[in-house]
Image (spheres, grey):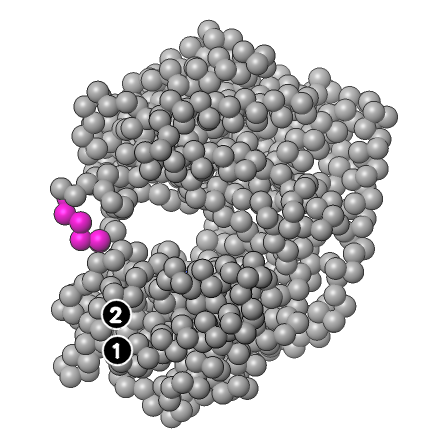
Amino acid sequence: MIKTHILGFPRMGEHRELKTALERHWRGELLATELEAQAAALRARHWQLQLDAGLDHVTVGDFALYDHVAHLIQLFGCEPARFGFTGQEPPLQRYFTMARGTATHAHTEACGCGGAPGDGVPALEMTKWFDTNYHYLVPEFDSATVFTLNAERLLAEVDEAIALPASPKVALLGPVSFLFLGKSKQDGFDRLALLKRLLPAYEQLLTRLAARGVTWVQLDEPILGLDLAPAWREALRQAYARLGVVGQPLLLATYFSPLGDNLDLACELPVAGLHVDAVRTPAELLPIARLLPQDRELSVGILDGRNIWRSDLDAALVQLRHVKALRGGRLWVAPSCSLLHVPFSLRHDKALDSELQSWLAGAVEKLDELRVLKRALWGDEESVARELAESRIVRADRVASRRVRNGTVRARLKALPADADQRRSPFPVRHAAQRQRLRLPAFPTTTIGSFPQTPEIRAARAAFKRGELSEAAYHEAMHREIELAVRKQEALGLDVLVHGEAERNDMVEYFGEQLAGFAFTANGWVQSYGSRCVKPPVLFGDVSRPQAMTVGWTVYAQSLTPKPMKGMLTGPITILQWSFVRDDQPRADTALQIALAIRDEVADLEAAGIAVIQIDEPAIREGLPLRRDAWGDYLAWATRAFRVSASPVRDDTQIHTHMCYSEFNDILPEIAAMDADVITIETSRSDMELLRGFGDFRYPNEIGPGVYDIHSPRVPETAEMLRLLKKAAEVIPPALLWVNPDCGLKTRGWVETEAALGRMVEAAMELRREV
Ligand code: GLN
Ligand code: ZN
């Protein structure tokens, strides 16, 4: 028997209806009942699509108003005590309080916005869902945490699906991953101790779902793709030894990462079925198909749930038939992971030409691919002959397309000298040459690139895009903004200036729009968190740079001031990481192509007289593979790509890089190997603790630890920044220390920006006097 199913579906709706409804509800324009009704309508629509594609089950429980992990917190009644809920509040109100906090903005644990505790309750912390750009709300656990089942919402959704009528498969995060992904909120408390309290709640739930007529429950344990300590592996054993005997058939789901040393464990757990990601880890598929006991169902995640290319259905069929033969003719077929990570649909996207549209598959198109695969596996190939042939033609077309392959780029890559990633001289020589040329004071001050994006700036950009503002008028408007930013920086007494990035909507999109090989969708939205969605560029072909991208703006900015003007670029890994990337060549090769384009921009900036160039790489860390044994390979090509982009310059041209949102201490050798002359990092919220690692490691080049948090409008005191700087000077040699904020200032207003930068410059001057 062949079955098809999905692990989850995008929630936002074809036109981001959920986003609109949520935001109206938060503004008080939509009643809770109306919001719930709209959510139910979206679920019904999405289930209907699943039925139309002939799936054997519709997936229930994957939908969430804000986040599926937050729903689990309510399902198991473990809302953190710090929210002070009485239990009388409506569940939906409590849910949004956890998700968003109660105050004018959602405080985070360390948001440092200066809000007094009485001002409100900070929201649950948010963090990245494995290596995706989706962010989940982090459950909080301590020794007082108890679990009580509140199954009403989930059961109501099950009833909605049954009423369609459809056969629901309920999908939830499994108990061990739920605990793993949460945080212990008590010193020395091991949240694994909660497992024995949590399992009865899962047991009860499974019993109730079975009673409701649910024939399958999918429990996701994506932590099986991580390097797990023995205690967590043991927890998985214990959990499924108990849950596996409740009588409710369980499909254990893993995705994103190789099972590796957990492969035997995953195959042994006493559940009715196992789902594996055959896209990320094709090599594990056949071993699992052989190892998994024959009385278990094997669900093969054969369609890429993380990317938007149409599948090679022929290749998929070869693999699936092989597995089918090994499994006595039984098989489930699915996308590799939840379709949450791809847009709703791309087939009719208005911004894409028909050729590009034909290459892509959003969630709806992937459902159709499942329909075709199932028919073909049934032996009913005839009925889908047209679809299979079309898929073949489209793939061949993509492979052969002149838009995808650029001979010049390929030849250049092939001929790239081995030392193209090396500066001419080692850092000490460059350091001396740059001192000569730049003549900066000790503890030089700078900013990270962007200045406040005022409503006027946004309006001008939008009008220009719509064709309502002429190019000349737009340039004039941007020049005015650049001049304003330069004058303000001069008045503040900053040492290395920036042009302010007024012309950029987004640090990746801005470059993608100017590079060949990228396309942009009109409606390719993917949920990032809550109601927030992003629309990643589509990197479909060889990357090249038809013309200079930033030189005009930067040179204009430099013409206004004798102080050094820092050119501002986005690095190859960040561009790669925040795009949907082609799947027909290794990511390493694509990164190198982007690196060459950025390298040309760097060379052009230098030739135009720019002495300082920053190449931002905030995403380098998030590209790390989930498994430690794969880090080395990734870091080798990622850091090489950065160096290729940064290395065409003379010794006296100073290359900066910038990173944020991350811990770096476990990849310091690789960060050092990027060999930027100056690195600026986000550190203020960690009270400079992040910097200690750089000190202990004896990070060799110059470094600018952020001295104030840019995520809130709070203006810190001079003394506070001075204290942080002195702390930094204890671990970093003073000759290597820079003074700057944590990150760019585009989300801030000018008032707090000028006040904060004024004090930052004061702190630097005080330090110069004291040291
Ligand atoms: N140069 C960018 C800015 O200042 C850097 C943004 C980032 O690190 N995310 O906005
Ligand atoms: Zn940053």
User: Does any portion of residue 658 appear in the rendered image?
Assistant: no
- Residue of label 2: 754
Q: Left or right: 389 with respect to 352?
A: right
Residue 602 locus on image (x, y percent): 54, 77
- The front one of 634 and 268 is 634
Q: Quadrant of residue 436?
A: bottom left
Instruction: Say whether residue 116 is magenta.
Output: yes
SS assignment for the magenta stretch, majority: loop
Q: Are marks 2 and 1 in contact (CB under 8 Å)?
A: yes
Q: Secondary structure at mark 1?
A: helix
Asked whether 317 falls inside the magenta stretch, the response is no
Q: Residue visible at 53% across and 78% down? A: 551
In the rendered image, which residue does mark 1 sit on? 492
Please provide percent x and percent y for residue 231. Answer: 37, 34
Which residue occupies the extreme top position in the image?
Answer: 211
Q: Residue at x 48, y 41 (%)?
A: 527
Percent x, y for residue 757?
Answer: 25, 71
Q: Quadrant of residue 294?
A: top right
Residue, x 70% and y 31% (percent of image)? 368
Disc 2 C-beta below 8 A from ligand 1: no
Q: Nearer the viewer, residue 132 or 468?
A: 468
Type of the residue with mark 1: Leu
Name the residue located 43 percent from the left edge and 15 percent from the top edge. Answer: 155
